[in-house]
Every structure is written in C-alpha cells, then in structure tokens.
Amino acid sequence: MKRTLFALAAATLVTLPAVTVPVLADEAAFARASGCMACHAVDRRMVGPSFRDISARYAGQADAVARMTVKVQRGGAGVWGPIPMPANPRLSEADARRLAVWSLSHR
C-alpha cells in the first residue's frame, strides 16, 4: 500500500505543470526581488521595522502567518508608527505567504 502511494505521489510530481512564479532558493533574495528590503532589514530598523522585531511581536500568535500574509498584500498603517506600508497587489497569496513565513522566522 505504501509503495503504491509513493509511486502515485512520484508520478504526480512528474506531471505537475511548471510554476509561473520565479522560484528562488534563497528566501532573502526573494524578499529583495519583491521590494521588501527597500524598507526592512533583518536586524535593524529602516523605514519599517526589522524582521527580527516583526518576528518578536507576532511570536506565539497562531494566526501570525495569516495576518502577515494579508499585510504583505494589502499593506498596513499605524502598527509600527506613522509611515504606512504600501500594498503589494501584484504578489500572489502564495508569494505573500512565503514572505510572511520568512519574515516571521527571524528570532
């Protein structure tokens, strides 16, 4: 049974269509390519908070990835000060989630 499931899973992976979004092995490079690093840095505040500060603020919150995904796509204001974070409507939900997960991983 396990061999059958494994064979089916392997066959499915081979037949999946190509991903249209550029796949970057390095999540930091993806964040740079998406424009995040224009306002954020990993370990220091720039225009916006550092990724470490973001990660610390949302630590332990079960819905942190979902909330950050929305913020990445829609932007936000008032949480970290008077400068608003612009929306990123061209990012797919999957890419916004990818950035949210990466942003929250800096502890």
Image (cartoon, grey):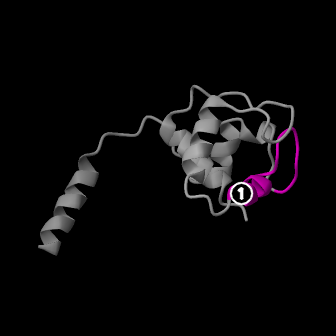
Compare residues 35 and 13 and report the one nearer the observer.
35
Residue located 77% across and 58% down the image: 52
Residue 31 appears in which quarter of the rendering? top right
> On the picture, is 23 further left or further right than 48?
left
Q: Is residue 44 left or right of residue 34?
A: right
Question: Which of these two is toward me, 96 or 5?
Answer: 96
Quadrant assignment, res 72:
top right
Quarter holding the C terminus? bottom right
Give residue 19's position: percent from left, percent from top.
40, 39
Q: Residue at x 81, y 38 (%)?
A: 39
Residue under the point 63% across and 54% down: 102
Which portion, as a residue range, is magenta? 43-58
Q: Is residue 66 left or right of residue 45?
A: left
Count how many numbered circles sit on residues in the image. Answer: 1
Residue indicated by mark 1:
55
In this view, which residue lies farthest toward the bottom?
A: 2
**Where residue 87 sits in the image (x, y, percent)?**
66, 27
For label 1, the SS is helix
Quarter of the image where the N terminus is located: bottom left
Q: Is residue 68 above or below residue 26?
A: above
In the image, residue 87 above or below residue 14: above
Residue 29 point in image, percent of width and height: 67, 47
Mark 1, Cα crowd under 10 Å, few <14 / some 14-19 / many 20+, is: some
